[in-house]
Amino acid sequence: MNINVDSLNSGFSKEVSFDGNITLPKSLVYHKDVYIQGKGVITNSYGKYTFEGSILANVTFNCNSCLKEFKKEIAFDMTEVFSKDIEDDDEIWLFSSKDNIIHLEEPIKTNLLLNLPMKALCSENCKGLCHICGHNLNEGDCGCDRDYIDPRFEKFLHLFNNKEV
Ligand SMILES: [Zn+2]
Ligand SMILES: [Zn+2]
């Protein structure tokens, strides 16, 4: 994810491709270690380097409903501008003038976080966990009577549903 732009003169572009692991901030929704594959084009325009490319991230999620781990690929496009000059522009990433290497890791992280869901489901029809015994209902039924309602709660349900229970 480090691109050497030493020989990339102004007015020229070059194709780049890369892969590697990045580490996201801790979350209950997804695992922090993510394998990234990316490809794109870097263009030098008077010392401003624009990366335009597409990223494929292999993310491990925890299902919001049954808690099971599952992997899903998240694909997104990104365009980011890099410069060595300090400019009054939040949209531009600075890179060191000591070497001619653009580090794509942070911009990729930022873009990936924007593309991650707030909640994740292992499948659209995930049945979740039995709220009585905790069994994963996607693996079959556990036999609990989940329709049983504690009589003490019945009158509250009645209030919420506004109908006879
Ligand atoms: Zn699930
Ligand atoms: Zn159960």
Image: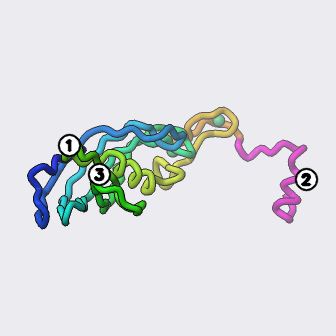
* Image x and y of residue 106, in percent: 36, 47
Residue stretch in magenta: 146-165
Query: Which quarter of the rendering shows the C terminus?
Result: bottom right
Residue 66, quarter of the rendered image: top right
Residue 33, quarter of the rendered image: top left
- Mark 2, residue position: 155
Q: Nearer the viewer, residue 59 or 94?
A: 94
Relative side of 119 to 74, left or right: right
Mark 3 residue type: Leu
Mark 1 residue type: Asp
* Image x and y of residue 131, in percent: 68, 39
Question: Can residue 140 be seen from the camera position used here?
Answer: no
Q: Secondary structure at mark 1?
A: loop
Relative side of 163 to 105, left or right: right
Residue at 84%, 55% in the rendered image:
157
The CA distance from mark 1 to mark 2 is: 71 Å
Query: Which quarter of the rendering shows the N terminus?
Result: top left
- Mark 3, residue position: 56
